[in-house]
Amino acid sequence: MNQILVFDVGSSVLKAVLFDQSGAVTGSASAPITTRTKTDRSVEQSVDDWWQAVLTASAKLPSRDNVTAVVLTGSMQNLIALSNDGTAAGPAILYSDRRLGGDEVEMMRARLPADYAERTGNRLDPAHPILKIIRLERYSLTGRTVARYLFGAKDAVIHRMTGQAVIDPTTATTTGLFNIRKYDWDTELLAATGVTLDRLPRVVPADAVVGPLLGAPAAALGLRPGVPVFNGAGDGAAATWGALAECPQSAYVYIGTTGWVAATMTLSEANPPRDIYTLADPIHRDRAILISPFLNAGSALDWLSEVTSVTVETLLDNAERERPGPLFLPYLSGERAPFQDQAVRGAFLGLDRQHRSGALCRAVLEGIAFAVRHNLETACLPAVPLTVIGGGARSPLLRQILADSLGQTTHWPLASQEIPALGVYRMVAAKLGFSPVERHHGSETVDPRSEEAESTQRRYESYLEASCFSRTLSPSLALRGSADPEASQLWRKE
């Protein structure tokens, strides 16, 4: 049976996933990716390491003789400089690199068109690669002439596979150089950076064939030369399509170390810029993906495990036996959305001497669920139908608390870790005659408990009031050096 091979170049792990013609997973493997961070707040990865991870994961898969297409997804908002011979001119600068200070960003803002946000669909963010290009001398390049820029991890792998320099519209949106309404590079923004169009990758839809797999990379991967390589899309779009939320007025939640709520709307309904991220759809130019990111999800549970010296698994087991007790504000690292506040911090309210680790864990799970609801409501994103993905949502108790908090049925795909790979599979399936996959192969549905509705609503209202009060206290409680002043800009999945 014919198969599609998907490579997902994540921020810490590369996954290789095989799908058959029905959309079922027939094999998967992974390889780690090393990130190098320094005291200057640099965050870098090696382009060669990405390729080695592709080879390592591919070699772990079962037979690849029937692979008829390759498609990719991966992290976005990186800066990858290529030299004249097509090799990397230095390390890949990740979206989380923070070498540019706030004063520098403000100075560069003056160089950009006043309607930058209207053009790009997003307000200027220190993570936008346009700023790194303007201050290229700050980064660890080899001194060779930069002939071309790439911005997605998967784009660097595609370049290695096919020799083609391409980008999908979703990844392009995150660069600060893309006009979301024209659905192409913006000439005035390019002029502001001094970068000519021939140094940027071609913007092509996710379901476009970039080119055939070249001989040398095919041999290294154990695949046939000439296999078509599809463009695919950045991880934000891949997760959206994998959650079956690519149609207007559909939404989903991602819960990992951090989290986000996201929805697809028509571009006219989205009407960017907003206070949250707006990404171009990878295929449909009249649609947009809106993402409202919050900083503390699974990380709050990890923190509780560290301070109590109790494993996460034991905490979750203990929490199953608890009723609602303390109220938890999850702002351990400030917040990005539904409000942006670098100084706000978390809290437990209503503590009693009888409360033990299980009660605290239950409160943390409820705080995560309330953060999801708060983001959905503040961003005015549709709440129905709602799919929840991400490894941080593995707890059955969290699933129930979230359904109760939202007052609606939620759907949880069982193969949550492969959702981005499924997303790009779905983008190209029709062109290959494969199943479009309109429902997940295995999912759990959780209904809200009517008997919990009144008390949950009261606790949510208390959560909102406590959040406002916490923000008024934050200036007097702030500890010197307790927070990265720009950390609240980060929203990517870990």
Image (cartoon, rainbow, N blue to C red):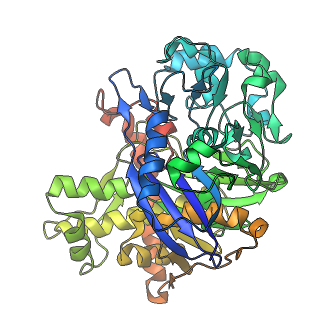
Q: How many marks?
A: 0
Q: Residue at x 56, y 41 (%)?
A: 153
Give residue 45's position: percent from left, percent from top. Answer: 44, 34
Give residue 442's position: percent from left, percent from top. Answer: 52, 82
Q: Residue at x 49, y 88 (%)?
A: 450
Q: Is residue 433 above or below residue 303?
A: below
Quadrant (top left, top right, bottom left, bottom right) of the N terminus: bottom right
Q: Is residue 397 visible?
A: yes
**Which of the 4 image quadrants contains residue 472?**
top left
Q: Residue at x 18, y 52 (%)?
A: 307
Give residue 431's position: percent from left, percent from top. Answer: 78, 65
Give residue 114's position: percent from left, percent from top. Answer: 77, 23
Q: Is residue 465 visible?
A: no
Q: Is residue 469 above or below residue 119?
A: below
Q: Pick whichever, 1 or 285, lies toward us.
A: 1
Q: Is residue 29 left or right of residue 290?
A: left
Q: Pick whichever, 68 or 340, lies toward us.
A: 68
Q: Pick whichever, 217 or 309, lies toward us.
A: 217
**Which of the 4 image quadrants contains residue 173?**
top right
Q: Residue at x 30, y 59 (%)?
A: 301
Q: Pick whichever, 208 or 58, lies toward us.
A: 58
Q: Is residue 363 above or below residue 410?
A: above
Q: Is residue 130 left or right of residue 319?
A: right
